[in-house]
Image (cartoon, helix red, strand yellow):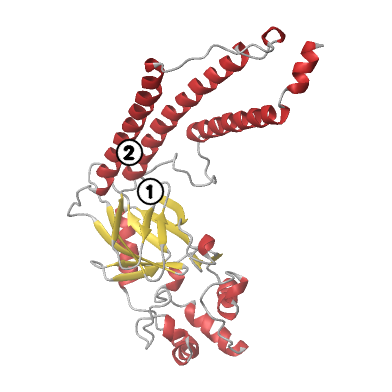
Amino acid sequence: MRIVETMQKANWPAIISRATGVAILLAGVLLAAGLSTATPQANSVTSIFDSHSTPADSIRHLSFFVLGVTGLIFLVVFSLLTYTVVKFRSRAADAGREPAQVYGSTQIELAWTIIPILIVVVLFLATARVIHAIQDAPKPAEAVEVTVIGHQFWWEFRYPELGIVTANELHVPVSDPSRPTPTFLRLLSADTDHSFWIPQLAGKTDLIPNRVNEAWLDPHETGLFLGQCAQYCGTQHAKMLLRVYVDSPAEFKVWARGQQQPANEDETAAAGRRVFERTACLNCHAISGTNGSGRFGPDLTHLMSRRTIAAGAAENNSQNLRLWIQNPDSIKPGSLMPAMKLSDAELDALVRYLETLQ
């Protein structure tokens, strides 16, 4: 009867709530451990645990260290909690008896004060070391310099030394450890707060109006690396995507030479060029050799050299290009590009002209 009464008096909702909380914590630790040890697949979501650049390597190593320390803390606390629950569980013989009281234990006070302080100091020093190594890295003479400007909702890339202006797809050379060629980025914002993040190449760095921030990356292998804006900047923040193409030195030179060329002047597409020059397109976009010099939208001089449009929201092909001009909200609802309201003939001519801009 006493056991039944004890069970009836037990606060079962609180017990279930605590057990659920412990189970969730354990699941979180197991998930983090799985992510940190999993081998990334070719089409997997981009991950900080699959680093391919020195800054990303430093962040990955720091993440492993922090996960190890916090995982150890969890195991110790969970083990002590389990021991306490089992050892000092309520028994029928203990009914009405108060447990031993401990007051003013200097050892206990020192333990739960000094140990957490030491843990915090160790994590702080490890983090500060990584931040210092990344932010204060020297810039070699061979470094490529790129100015990154965040817009709602696209990226502008300017290579001052090369005279190149492009958008949304950043091209950088691979950095050979024997001959490092890092890329240093000056990060600016044209409107609101943005955040530049390519998890496999570097950590997050904010772009703040009226402030210049800096970041750098030195990719160790060629390929395509994905990222996006990591700071909520408005309606289409989620579709403000980044594509970083890491080219071999020879490929990067070929790409740069192509971007330095003037816009292609195909006489068969002259009608489309006239549509561009006499409509509101030129107020936002620039094309070399035309009277369009707008800065509110991407430079279109070499539009067809990019694989995507609308900051990675759609593949760059005739169908999507036509749809993007005709009705931007069908691809990117809430984007700041207006529908141009062109006739079918004007739209066909404009798309044909844009397709010549290699």
> Alpha-carbon neighbours of circle 1 within 10 Å: few (<14), some, or many (≥20)?
many
Measured along the vertical axis of the image, is residue 244 above or below residue 103? Answer: below
Of residues 294 and 27, the one nearer the viewer is 27
Measured along the vertical axis of the image, is residue 303 above or below residue 223? Answer: below
Measured along the vertical axis of the image, is residue 259 above or below residue 70? Answer: below
Circle 2: element type: helix
Q: Is residue 22 left or right of residue 54?
A: right
For the view shown, which residue lies furthest in the right direction? Answer: 1
- Please state the horizontal and vertical placement of residue 345, each as a whole percent of the image: 59, 89
- Residue at 34% from the left image edge and 71% from the top image edge: 165
Say which label, 2 or 1, has the lower sequence index.
2
The quadrant of the picture occupied by the N terminus is: top right
Q: In which quarter of the view is residue 215 placed?
A: bottom left
Q: Is residue 12 left or right of residue 109?
A: right
Residue pointed to by mark 1: 203
- Residue at 35% from the left image edge and 85% from the top image edge: 289
- Please state the horizontal and vertical placement of residue 32, each as a whole percent of the image: 52, 34
Instruction: State how far apart marks 2 and 1 are (Cα).
Output: 13 Å
> Alpha-carbon neighbours of circle 2 within 10 Å: few (<14), some, or many (≥20)?
some
Of residues 120 and 125, the one nearer the viewer is 120
Measured along the vertical axis of the image, is residue 302 above or below residue 201? Answer: below
The quadrant of the picture occupied by the C terminus is: bottom left
Q: In which quarter of the view is residue 26 placed?
A: top right
Residue pointed to by mark 2: 127
Of residues 161 and 131, the one nearer the viewer is 131
Q: In which quarter of the view is residue 158 placed?
A: bottom left
- Please state the horizontal and vertical placement of residue 324, each as a whole percent of the image: 56, 75
Q: Is residue 196 left or right of residue 90?
A: left
Q: Are marks 2 and 1 in contact (CB under 8 Å)?
A: no
Kindly identify the amino acid type of the residue bearing the numbered disc 2.
Answer: Thr
Kindly identify the amino acid type of the residue bearing the numbered disc 1.
Answer: Gly
